[in-house]
Image (cartoon, rainbow, N blue to C red):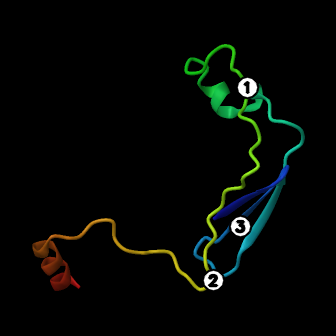
Amino acid sequence: MYLRGLGKESVVLMNARNPSWYALSLETKGDPQLQNIDTVCKFPDVFLDELPGLPPTREVEFGIEVQPGTAAVSISPFRMAAVELKELKAQI
């Protein structure tokens, strides 16, 4: 998934292990208000009664550019113990 803000418009590209890509364009109208943010509404005891406001709009855009032809890293998050690996290979 890739999210990139283009002023008041955001573009989301998704690939759910499917060779075709889907693009979704979201347009926001006006400045976001604190009372319209779901997290602020769901957890009122966590936030101050009077919030100073939202952070200012930054001029620097952040994005992770992926080089063409690269693939996501797909390795197991942990290694299997030698005994477990031997048992798994025996079962397969």
Asked which quadrant contains residue 91, the reply is bottom left
For residue 13, the mark is 3
- Residue found at the very far left of the displayed protein: 83
Real-space Cα distance between discs 3 and 2? 15 Å
Q: Position of residue 73 (x, y in %)?
A: 45, 74
Q: Amino acid at mark 1?
A: Gly
Q: Pointer 1: what residue?
A: 53
Numbered disc in front, either 3 or 1: 1
Q: Amino acid at mark 2?
A: Pro
Q: Secondary structure at mark 1?
A: loop
State yes or no: discs 2 and 1 in contact (Cβ < 8 Å): no
Q: Secondary structure at mark 3?
A: strand
- Residue found at the very far right of the displayed protein: 29
- Residue found at the very far front of the displayed protein: 59
Graded by Cα atoms within 10 Å as few (under 14), some (14 to 19) or many (20 or more), the crowding at tag 3 reads: few
Rendered-image quadrant of the N terminus: bottom right
Q: Amino acid at mark 3?
A: Leu
Compare marks 3 and 1 and give the one earlier in the sequence: 3
Q: Tell whether 35 sits left or right of 49.
A: right
Compare marks 2 and 1 and give the one earlier in the sequence: 1
Asked which quadrant contains residue 35, the reply is top right
Is 18 above or below relative to 36?
below
Q: Pointer 2: what residue?
A: 68
For residue 33, the mark is none
Compare marks 3 and 2 and give the one earlier in the sequence: 3
State yes or no: discs 3 and 2 in contact (Cβ < 8 Å): no
Graded by Cα atoms within 10 Å as few (under 14), some (14 to 19) or many (20 or more), the crowding at tag 1 reads: few
- The mark total stands at 3
Residue under the point 72% across and 55% down: 61
Real-space Cα distance between discs 2 and 1? 39 Å
